[in-house]
Amino acid sequence: NAGVTQTPKFRVLKTGQSMTLLCAQDMNHEYMYWYRQDPGMGLRLIHYSVGEGTTAKGEVPDGYNVSRLKKQNFLLGLESAAPSQTSVYFCASRSLQAGGPVETQYFGPGTRLLVL
Amino acid sequence: AQSVTQPDIHITVSEGASLELRCNYSYGATPYLFWYVQSPGQGLQLLLKYFSGDTLVQGIKGFEAEFKRSQSSFNLRKPSVHWSDAAEYFCAVGPQGAQKLVFGQGTRLTINP
């Protein structure tokens, strides 16, 4: 099992350019998440998905869009990148255990994005 | 609303010394609590978690944490740190059945040889 993988690992964009970050998981998890990590801010949730074809906003969704067309993939899009979106982006996934405790989130290695 | 506070942004300890990282949470009911570790350039790895039962939880790499409801705390401890423990540590909270976790700001741990 590869777990959670993220593509690309590093990217430099110019202001106004667009890009898509790909997250893939091979654990058959229902839930998937996109976070951004900034110094002194911890991890902040951008968007998440509770199943194929569903998405929901997190704490900092503005400027980002997501799609979950396949259960194993969760895409994060930046339509018009801004310097404020320079960050490290992490994807995570977890299983759904109805009626049970919150399951562990498993994280990918991260994507470093620099917007000039 | 849920929140998590890690009061210490940066801690430095000597190798072999004991360690305690603080985590305070705000939540109305019994929360589910997690500690994650992030090594430089890596993703987050789960160290331990608390759902219910024994308030002293054992994790990987020799770490443990104690849930204290009266103090709304979930502090992480290790009796003797190793140089490889240098990393950033995140506390997180989520209510029962929650779809989302709330993370603290993180504590960066430096180990002096």
Image (tube, rainbow, N blue to C red):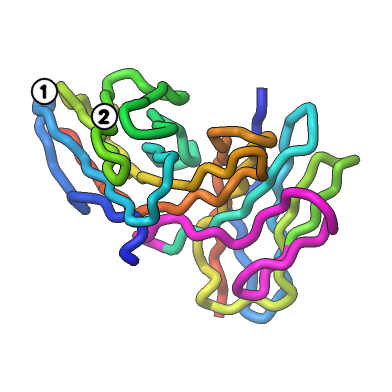
Q: Which residue is mark 2?
A: A67
- Magenta residues (range): B40-64
Q: Is residue A59 visible?
A: yes
**Three-letter amino acid code of the residue under disc 1:** Gly
- Magenta stretch holds residue B42: yes
Report the Cα–Cα distance between label 2 and label 1.
Answer: 21 Å
Q: Quadrant of the N terminus of chain B?
A: top right
Residue extending farthest right: B70
Q: Give the mark nearest the N terminus, 2 or 1.
A: 1
The nearer-to-camera label among 2 and 1 is 2
**Three-letter amino acid code of the residue under disc 2:** Ser
Residue drawn at x 49%, y 60% is B45
B88 to the left or right of B47? left
Image height of B112 relative to A75, above or below: below
- Magenta stretch holds residue A36: no
Q: Secondary structure at mark 2?
A: strand
Residue extending farthest front: A98
Residue drawn at x 69%, y 36% is B96
Which chain is disc 1 placed on? A
Nearer to me, A96 or B46? A96
A102 to the left or right of B52? left
Residue drawn at x 47%, y 40% is A43
Image height of B73 relative to A1, above or below: above
Which chain is disc 2 placed on? A
Q: Position of residue A99 (x, y in %)?
A: 66, 38
Q: Are marks 2 and 1 on the same chain?
A: yes
Q: Which residue is mark 1?
A: A16
Residue drawn at x 69%, y 43% is B32
